């Protein structure tokens, strides 16, 4: 397998992980708590895609998976909204560990719900685009991986525009920084927090669709996604959106490179060991918690 | 038994009896399958009891408890299978191995913020899971290893059936006794304050990092014990014992049963092990039900079943506080301590060039001052002048960017908060930092000998009860000196604001400090209460204790202090006799701004 | 008090934090376009009164009426929409947003109207203009104070609640700031201002209310209040 292919695979994996990590940070900043169900939402997105695929006549289409993308993202968004109302809102005045535990509970329910409905066997979603490979400059590249990178890039760009250039985005950021003050200037903080959850979950579900064709999805896959998102955000700096993306790519590159040399599980083990070392020496990550935030 | 012990026993009684009855009932007339299930519940009960140390008492979300359980299982099984060790040797060895791992992990990750700690423990757990699957030659890989022997002690095998169940529950009972001992000791009380008010706990001399490590080690020991018992009950060892599902199960048992009550661990373990048996329909969906139960409990009844029962029981028993009588000493009766009756002229606390900046904000820009034994130093200044920051630096919550702090001539600048507390600096907080779920007496007592309490208090060693009695006596006398003797048996959460301050003052006193730092002690008090507080403080100073008081109320502070220092924008702008300082034009300008005419 | 319709009417207001009574039976009326100074020592309840007026802390008793509308049970967001604006103690600008974003985020209006309001704020505080693209945490204390007030003004309020605006500011900045605050009332925004710097507050306010231990102990014209030494306004009172 050529180096170009390995690079593209790493980029594709990183792009998908970036969506998951971004969603995680959005929720983290908005709610001040860890969403432990983020990984299970990825898994749920994959299974939602599988369920939708069996109901729709996709084989005839040139871009079967892509058609599902907005549907899956919307379904994820709906799930995120529910999580916000059920696991966050009643607990928002309690210490953050309560929300952490509540999201663990949600994750458990997602995992075993999927297990009950779909069974434990591994499944695959339809490909994003029909067609196997494309030849660019004499090098054969997987069309799937390219499609994943393109889709994720577009979504990340849209998210960036939303946050930086729209009033809604500014309000989301303000509400995340100081919810009480935001309310005092008229921002509907409760609704925006639920929106943040919806966005975060939608991103996770979309990542599930992207990943579940190249890699299989099983009901127990959520934990690994959760850990990797957690690691990406820790490396990139807790609470930093830019750091989350960079951390995600670093994790993916490590995984793909180590996966070439060792088995997949051993690659994971090395990743976790690397995380523990990183926590030992530089717990604030590459970008740290944004400097000077406490004015 | 003291009053509080009686109350605690009364609370624990109904649930413990119920739990014991449940175990007996389940055991009576049970077949082989039910007996084994009961034994498994006992193993989990031990794991949950251990989890309560780190998760319930200390409040740190560890995600490695399942891994310690699995480690205990694998260690004991492998020692039996590969080396032929009997249970009497493999059991302690498995525990020792888990504690060793916890020591290594704990020393490195416990100091991290909570979200990093959870992540780190999760990473450790997953690492162990992968290790156990990949190291096929040792562990049998994904299939595990069959034919793990039962409980063999010195050549004699515990027969299958109810002897095994009794054997397991004997260990569980031992675990219960140890955990109950812990929660009723001064050591356990210290953990409650640590969870409720970490800064105040540090200022009272409690070494938070040491406590957390001890709790983590205890959790690992109990977890491994449960795992070792589990694997010999089951007869087979497999990666299922190391999966995250075990952690989830333990977490659900702890939260649903009640994470802060010993009985909660038993209730949780029994319930969640037997629920799928009682409701066959749950079989395939049991974890879904657990998850839903976890969510429901954490939202609606965060203290779990045990907590709900305890709350009901407390409402039945009612509040046992005696009416708090206050002796108001009118001002004139106690002579003002203007000059310290001590020949000692050397400063007990001195600060040189102290400076600190937070982000871009220079909170202190070079502060130098000193306090002598028996002196009352008033610290004033407009909002934002750095008074609270100075107190926090003196307490040891931050390290200064520049400058030094001397306590009785010794450089204490690099001492952490708890060490300064043990060296003689005591502190009170504006909001009255007490543990709500302890009585006033216990809040004070834990600072008396709580400083010297040890994790070994878990084991009822000789001298421990005497230590507690001495601490309680010291606490009573401190409460009397602070004028709060009548509130001794009131729960922290039920105290009125003025009483809270006095109980905090008592807690500061009981450690026999050399310097007391008071942050707005008179705020919100009535005039009569302020006068009483003033006389109490004068009495304390008369005994040679230095007092630094930050307060905004000049009518309260001026007659009380023997000297006053005024801060503005992080610098000392005036120091001297109270009347001179408030007449100082610099001071008036700082408070009033330009153009003040008074 | 003249016959102009009041902008704020507080009746028998009580506020409690746990077991501590921060406000007891507080009643007063504020006219439109007036500047009222809220004075008193630390812990007297000034902040609590402003927060209760904004709805950030619930009232356990009594009522708050804004322009004849009972807002006692309304959430802060709706009160902001009705025309009350709040500048807290310590400014609390949104640190990660730029100064311009801090202003924009408060304006619930189309882009053109937003620009108009922004220009008005910049006319009032020209020192903010060069800082517009910098992150708010990078601004100095005085600049942040101006930004916080500007942000509140972007909601086009009829009542501005200011909590200790002079903290941490050099006296010369305080004078300039208060001069601008005075001009606000003339242009149609009533101001209720809690202050420890009584001299500065009394120099711009027409009326003063003095709080102590959660109760109103004096309420009248600023000149009259200034001349009453028994109120120990300077905090450094007699003795």
Image (cartoon, coloured by chain):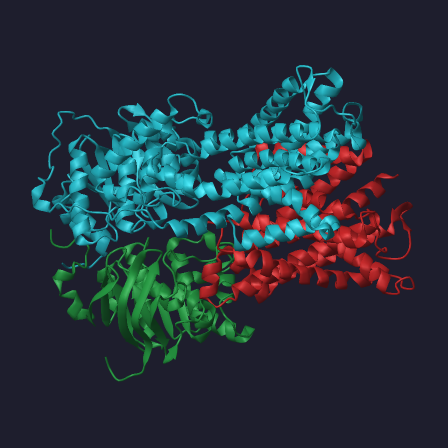
Chain colours: A red, B cyan, C green
Q: Position of residue B222 (x, y in %)?
A: 58, 30
Closer-to-camera residue (C38/B576): C38
Q: Indicate left or right for A130 with B538 as reference.
A: right
Q: Position of residue A24 (x, y in %)?
A: 63, 51
Q: Is residue A179 visible?
A: yes
Closer-to-camera residue (A5/B231): B231
Q: How many marks?
A: 0
Question: In which quadrant of the rendered view does residue A190 lie?
Answer: bottom right
Question: In which quadrant of the rendered view does residue B90 lie?
Answer: top right
Identity of the residue drawn at 70% across and 41% down: A250
Quadrant in the picture for the N terminus of chain B: top left
Q: Indicate left or right for A52 with A130 as reference.
A: left
Quadrant in the picture for the C terminus of chain B: bottom left
Identity of the residue drawn at 49% across and 52% down: A94
Q: Residue furthest front?
A: B29
Q: Residue furthest bottom?
A: C3
Using the image, determine if residue B19 lies above or below residue A277. below
Q: Is residue A271 visible?
A: no
Q: Indicate left or right for B383 with B5 as reference.
A: left
Using the image, determine if residue B66 lies above or below residue C69. above
Question: In which quadrant of the rendered view does residue B577 lie?
Answer: top left
Identity of the residue drawn at 44% across and 33% down: B208
Q: Position of residue B508 (x, y in %)?
A: 29, 36
Q: Position of residue C36 (x, y in %)?
A: 27, 70
């Amino acid at each position: 397998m050529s180096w170009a292919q390995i690079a593209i695979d790493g980029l594709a994996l990183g792009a998908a992980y970036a969506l998951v990590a971004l969603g995680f940070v959005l929720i983290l900043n908005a709610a001040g708590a860890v969403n432990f169900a983020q990984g299970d939402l990825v898994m749920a997105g994959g299974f939602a895609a599988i369920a939708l695929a069996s109901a729709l006549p996709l084989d005839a289409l040139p871009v079967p998976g892509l058609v599902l993308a907005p549907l899956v993202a919307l379904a994820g968004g709906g799930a995120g909204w529910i999580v916000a109302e059920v696991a966050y809102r009643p607990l928002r005045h309690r210490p953050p560990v309560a929300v952490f535990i509540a999201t663990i509970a949600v994750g458990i329910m997602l995992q075993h719900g999927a297990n009950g409905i779909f069974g434990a066997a591994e499944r695959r979603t339809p490909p994003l685009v029909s067609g196997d490979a494309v030849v660019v400059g004499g090098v054969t590249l997987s069309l799937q991986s390219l499609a994943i990178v393109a889709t994720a890039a577009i979504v990340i760009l849209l998210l960036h525009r939303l946050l930086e250039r729209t009033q809604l985005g500014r309000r989301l950021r303000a509400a995340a920084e100081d919810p009480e003050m935001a309310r005092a200037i008229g921002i509907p903080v409760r609704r925006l927090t639920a929106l943040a959850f919806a966005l975060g979950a939608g991103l996770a579900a979309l990542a599930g669709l992207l990943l579940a064709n190249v890699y299989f999805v099983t009901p127990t896959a959520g934990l690994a996604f959760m850990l990797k998102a957690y690691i990406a955000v820790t490396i990139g700096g807790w609470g930093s959106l830019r750091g989350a993306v960079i951390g995600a790519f670093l994790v993916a590159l490590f995984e793909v490179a180590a996966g070439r040399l060792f088995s997949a599980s051993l690659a994971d083990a090395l990743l976790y060991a690397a995380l523990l070392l990183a926590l030992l020496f530089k717990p604030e990550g590459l970008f740290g918690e944004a400097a000077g935030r406490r004015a | 038994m003291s009053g509080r012990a009686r109350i605690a026993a009364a609370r624990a009684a109904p649930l413990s009896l119920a739990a014991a009855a449940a175990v007996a009932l389940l055991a009576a007339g049970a077949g082989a399958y039910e007996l084994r299930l009961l034994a498994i519940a006992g193993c989990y009960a031990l794991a949950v009891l251990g989890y309560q140390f780190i998760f319930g008492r200390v409040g740190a979300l560890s995600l490695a408890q399942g891994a310690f359980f699995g480690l205990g299982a694998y260690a004991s099984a492998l020692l039996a299978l590969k080396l032929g060790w009997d249970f009497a040797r493999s059991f302690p060895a498995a525990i020792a191995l888990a504690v060793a791992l916890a020591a290594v992990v704990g020393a490195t990750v416990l100091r991290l913020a909570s979200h990093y700690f959870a992540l780190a423990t999760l990473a450790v757990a997953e690492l162990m899971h992968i290790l156990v699957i990949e190291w096929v030659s040792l562990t049998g890989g994904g299939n595990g290893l069959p034919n793990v022997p039962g409980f063999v002690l010195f050549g004699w095998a515990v027969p299958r059936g109810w002897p095994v169940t009794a054997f397991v529950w004997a260990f569980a009972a031992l675990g219960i006794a140890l955990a109950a001992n812990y929660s009723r000791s001064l050591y356990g009380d210290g953990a409650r304050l640590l969870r409720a008010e970490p800064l105040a706990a540090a200022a009272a001399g409690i070494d938070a990092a040491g406590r957390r490590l001890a709790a983590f080690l205890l959790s690992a020991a109990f977890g491994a014990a449960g795992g070792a018992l589990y694997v010999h009950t089951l007869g087979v060892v497999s990666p299922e014992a190391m999966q995250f599902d075990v952690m989830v199960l333990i977490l659900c048992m702890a939260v649903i049963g009640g994470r802060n009550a010993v009985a909660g661990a038993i209730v949780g373990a029994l319930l969640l092990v037997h629920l799928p048996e009682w409701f066959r329909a749950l079989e395939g969906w049991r974890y879904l039900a657990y998850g839903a139960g976890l969510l429901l409990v954490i939202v609606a009844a965060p203290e779990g079943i045990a907590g709900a029962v305890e709350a009901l029981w407390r409402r039945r028993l009612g509040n046992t506080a005696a009416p708090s009588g206050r002796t108001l000493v009118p001002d004139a009766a106690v002579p003002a301590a203007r000059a310290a009756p001590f020949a000692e002229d050397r400063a007990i606390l001195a600060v040189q060039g102290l400076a600190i900046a937070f982000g871009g904000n220079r909170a202190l820009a070079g502060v130098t001052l000193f306090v002598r034994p028996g002196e009352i130093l008033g610290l004033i200044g407009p909002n934002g002048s750095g008074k609270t920051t100075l107190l926090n630096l003196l307490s040891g919550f931050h390290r200064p960017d520049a400058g030094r702090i001397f306590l009785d001539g010794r450089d204490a600048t690099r001492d952490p908060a708890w060490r300064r507390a043990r060296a003689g600096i005591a502190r009170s907080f504006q909001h009255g930092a007490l543990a709500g779920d302890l009585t006033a007496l216990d809040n004070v007592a834990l600072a008396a000998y709580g400083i010297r309490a040890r994790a070994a208090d878990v084991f009822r060693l000789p001298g421990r009860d005497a230590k507690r009695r001495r601490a309680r006596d010291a606490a009573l006398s401190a409460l009397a000196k602070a004028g709060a003797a009548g509130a001794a048996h009131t729960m922290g959460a039920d105290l009125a604001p003025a009483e809270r301050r006095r109980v905090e003052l008592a807690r500061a006193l009981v450690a026999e400090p050399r310097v007391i730092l008071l942050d707005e002690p008179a705020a919100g008090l009535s005039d009569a209460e302020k006068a009483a507080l003033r006389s109490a403080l004068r009495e304390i100073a008369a005994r040679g204790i230095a007092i630094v008081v930050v307060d905004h109320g000049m009518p309260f502070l001026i007659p009380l202090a023997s000297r006053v220092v005024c801060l503005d924008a992080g610098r000392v702008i005036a120091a001297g006799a109270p009347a001179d300082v408030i007449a100082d034009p610099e001071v008036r300008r700082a408070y009033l701004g330009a153009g003040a005419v008074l | 008090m003249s016959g102009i319709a009041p902008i704020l009417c507080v009746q028998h207001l009580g506020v409690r934090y746990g077991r501590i009574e921060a406000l007891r039976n507080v009643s007063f009326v504020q006219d439109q376009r007036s500047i009222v100074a809220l004075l008193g020592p630390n812990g007297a309840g000034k902040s609590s009164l402003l927060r209760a007026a904004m709805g950030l802390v619930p009232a356990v008793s009594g009522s708050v009426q804004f322009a004849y509308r009972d807002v006692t049970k309304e959430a802060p967001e709706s009160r902001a929409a009705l025309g009350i604006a709040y500048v807290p103690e310590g400014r609390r600008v949104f640190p990660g947003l730029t100064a311009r974003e801090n202003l924009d985020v408060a304006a619930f209006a189309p882009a053109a109207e937003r620009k108009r309001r922004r220009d008005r704020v910049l006319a009032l505080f020209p020192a903010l203009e060069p800082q517009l693209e910098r992150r708010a945490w990078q601004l100095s204390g005085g600049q942040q104070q101006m930004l916080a007030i500007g942000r509140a003004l972007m909601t086009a309020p009829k009542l501005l609640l200011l909590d200790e605006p002079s903290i941490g500011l050099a006296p010369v900045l305080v004078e300039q700031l208060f001069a601008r605050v005075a001009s606000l009332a003339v242009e149609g925004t009533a101001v209720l201002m809690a202050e420890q710097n009584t001299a500065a507050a009394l120099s711009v306010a027409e009326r003063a209310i003095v709080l102590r231990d959660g109760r109103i102990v004096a309420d009248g014209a600023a000149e009259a209040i200034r001349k009453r030494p028994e109120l120990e306004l300077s905090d450094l009172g007699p003795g």
